[in-house]
Image (tube, rainbow, N blue to C red):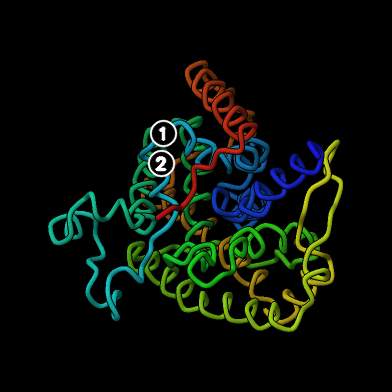
Amino acid sequence: MKLKSSVIAISIILICYGITHAWGFWGHQHINNKAVFTLPKSMFGFFKTNIGFITEHAVDPDKRRYADPEEAPRHFIDIDRYGEHPFDSLPRTWKEAVAKIGEDTLKAHGIVPYHIPKMLYRLTQAFKDKDKFKILKYAAELGHYVGDAHVPLHCTRNYNGQLTGQHGIHGFWESRIPETYGDDYDYFVGRAHYIKDPITYTWNIIKESYAAHDSVLQIERELNAKTAADRKFAFEERGSTVVKVYSKDYTAEYNQLLNGMVERRMRQATIAVGSFWYTAWVNAGMPEINDPEVIAITETFQTEMDSINNIYTNRKRMGSGAGHED
């Protein structure tokens, strides 16, 4: 009986995984990793030499959600909380939005399109200062938020299907599918380009993501209606535990019905991340940073990450989320 209860508990944690981790760790790390290969020669050497840091620390913002109460709103925006025509009425800049709506309300409904320009500014300053460690840190974190903005369910209050009886769809779309099929995706997305208007560019990403969220939900709802319960889920071994997951057949059918949507959003996120990095470098005056040296992690950063990792590990062990919640 205890074993059964443990399996159920672990299953619940797994199915809710996507609430906390957009794209999952796998997806975020792959987006940052592949974005390095979009950069021009003048940047590529430095980023390629330090690709391990860029990849590993793509998930730092998700881990930080367990330690910093200010972190969670930076990963999403419930755009449908702002009326029938939110893109016409919601101010595009943080200052204007605070003046019109108020900071508390904005944070309650998510601020990812406002946080991306802030991170772009930080990265630009790091380039200007030629602070190579901060360049890597801010590039990795900026990549995370840009990746989050490309997830359709990060742009709606029905972020995990909880309003339509589809609890778990968040992790299904952004973790289960890319982890199953992502190794076969085409990551040749072209060269990073200069973003003339980062604010408009960011909001266009949000528009595209929000436009897709209805399909994400509707397609799964229709598939679920014609699928027997015993075909929808399966049990898989994960290390020393057995967990409940969406079955391979159900995942394959959903992925096919989505017609490549997950791959397209990952590809678009990859080129967007590379382009934001390139834009920060250009705006900083294109400083020479291409020395092929591995940048050492600072003692302060290591101490901070040790603390965050400890909190993250303990919270995950307890099964406590820090996710996009009402």
Amino acid under disc 1: Asp
Residue 129, image quadrant: top left
Tell me which residue sits at (67%, 57%) in the image.
Answer: 175
In the picture of the structure, the residue carrying the numbered disc 1 is 68
Amino acid under disc 2: Glu
Q: x%, y% of residue 134?
A: 46, 32
| Disc assigned to residue 24 | none
In the picture of the structure, the residue carrying the numbered disc 2 is 71
Task: State the quadrant of the C terminus.
Answer: bottom left
Mark 1 nearby-residue class (10 Å; few <14, some 14–19, many ≥20)? few
The answer to whether residue 221 is left or right of residue 200 is right
Tell me which residue sits at (79%, 48%) in the image.
Answer: 243
Labels 1 & 2 near each other (Cβ < 8 A): yes
Which of 1 and 35 lies nearest the eye of the viewer? 1
- Under tag 1, what secondary structure? loop
Which of 219 and 3 lies nearest the eye of the viewer? 3
Which of 265 and 315 lies nearest the eye of the viewer? 315
Q: Is residue 100 above or below residue 60?
A: below
